[in-house]
């Protein structure tokens, strides 16, 4: 089922989330973009673009709120406007909820020979990064990789978990 989605996106992972959802047949009702490139792409696609949740507050609508590297806490009242609530996509969901999970994960795993990393799409709740997991993907990384290389390795996982989570919600 195609849904009308309101997006909150960071730069690269957020754009992957937006484009994956669109490719899967969903529509954007608006985009809060925390980066210039994401805002530019959303504008090229004729979606309303905002720089903060506060700026978009009165205009938010749709079936679902999707946050992919969004940088603001979404109030419960805001999520209540959406038929299916919200989904957040997060790397290192179980071990490192909150900000900068890759940096914290990388530091904690720096002396291990094999490192498994996950990307999870989960429901948004009043407790930050503690919703019900809807989809997850894993990859194994070599020790000592830079934060940039780690992100480049996991970007495809974002597309997979977003598509799977949206299909699960839309059933």
Image (cartoon, helix red, strand yellow):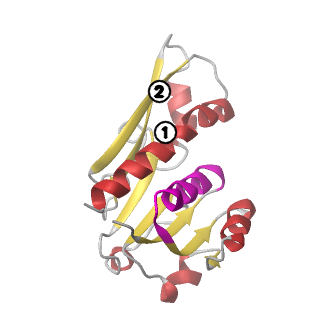
Tell me if residue 30 comes above or below residue 91 in the rendering. Answer: below
Question: Residue 54: where, in percent of width, then height?
Answer: 55, 81
Tell me the residue at 58%/71% (across/down): 32
Residue pointed to by mark 2: 139
Q: Secondary structure at mark 1?
A: helix
Question: Residue 164: where, in percent of width, then height?
Answer: 36, 48
Q: Is residue 25 magenta?
A: yes
The Cα–Cα distance between marks 1 and 2, rounded to whole angstroms, is: 8 Å
Q: Earlier in the sequence, mark 1 or mark 2?
A: 2
The quadrant the N terminus occupies is: bottom left
Question: Residue 128: where, in percent of width, then height?
Answer: 37, 57
Q: Quadrant of residue 36?
A: bottom right
Query: Which label sits on residue 83?
Result: none
Q: Is residue 109 magenta?
A: no
Q: Image check: 14 left or right of 128?
A: right
Tell me the residue at 53%/66% (across/down): 8
Q: Which residues are magenta?
A: 11-27
Residue pointed to by mark 1: 157
């Amino acid at each position: 089922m195609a849904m009308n989605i309101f997006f909150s996106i960071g730069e690269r992972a957020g754009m992957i989330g937006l484009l994956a959802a669109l490719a899967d047949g969903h529509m954007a009702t608006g985009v809060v973009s925390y980066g210039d490139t994401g805002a530019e792409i959303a504008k090229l696609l004729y979606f309303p673009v905002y720089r903060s949740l506060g700026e978009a507050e009165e205009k938010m609508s749709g079936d679902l709120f999707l946050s992919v590297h969004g940088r603001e806490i979404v109030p419960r009242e805001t999520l209540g406007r959406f038929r299916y609530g919200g989904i957040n996509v997060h790397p290192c969901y179980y071990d490192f909820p909150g900000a900068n999970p890759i940096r914290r994960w990388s530091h904690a795993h720096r002396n291990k020979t094999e490192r498994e990393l996950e990307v999870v799409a989960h429901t948004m709740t009043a407790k930050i990064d503690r919703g019900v997991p809807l989809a997850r993907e894993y990859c194994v990384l070599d020790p000592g990789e830079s934060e940039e290389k780690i992100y480049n390795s996991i970007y495809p996982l974002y597309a997979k978990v977003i598509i799977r989570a949206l299909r699960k919600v839309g059933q």
